Image: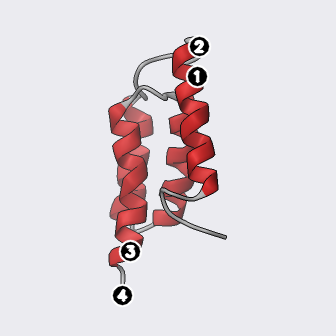
Amino acid sequence: MQRGLNSPEAQALRHKAEAATQNGAAKDEAPTAAEVNQLVVLFNAGRYVEMERQTRLLVAEYPSSGIVWKSWVLPFWCKEKMP
């Protein structure tokens, strides 16, 4: 399975999010504070795989949210930096 931002799965998710934005399917513009805090907890605990999964869900739910997209990149970056 190819991992990273250029994988077919990541590209498909990006296209789905773009389509949702164009169709006005996004329910809100940003995640709740609790949803963002959950990502912070996962990041601080080094649980990057779980953070990646959670951010994928949030990208689908909030495709126009910059914080969600930026949060989605962090697990990939951190996993590459791990020894």
Q: Position of residue 70 (x, y in %)?
A: 34, 45
Instruction: Say which residue label 3 marks.
Output: 80
Q: Report crowding for label 1: few under 14, some 14 to 19, many 20 or more residues within 10 A (C-alpha).
A: some
Q: Which is in the foreground here, disc 3 or disc 2?
A: 2
Mark 2: amino acid: Asn
In the picture, the disc for residue 83 is 4
Taking the spot 63% from the left edge, 53% from the top edge, the residue there is 9
SS for tag 3? helix
Q: Quadrant of residue 65?
A: top left
Give the CA separation, mark 3 to mark 4: 8 Å
Taking the spot 61% from the left edge, 68% from the top edge, the residue there is 2
User: In the current view of this chain or complex, which residue is farthest to the bottom?
Assistant: 83
Q: Which is in the foreground here, disc 4 or disc 2?
A: 2
User: In the current view of this chain or complex, which residue is farthest to the top?
Assistant: 24
Instruction: Say which residue label 2 marks.
Output: 23
Compared with 79, 28 (above or below) is above
Q: Nearer the viewer, residue 31 or 75?
A: 75
Give the CA separation, mark 1 to mark 3: 30 Å
Give the CA separation, mark 1 to mark 4: 37 Å
Taking the spot 49% from the left edge, 46% from the top edge, the residue there is 55
Give the CA separation, mark 3 to mark 2: 35 Å
Sequence-first disc among 4 and 2: 2
SS for tag 1? helix
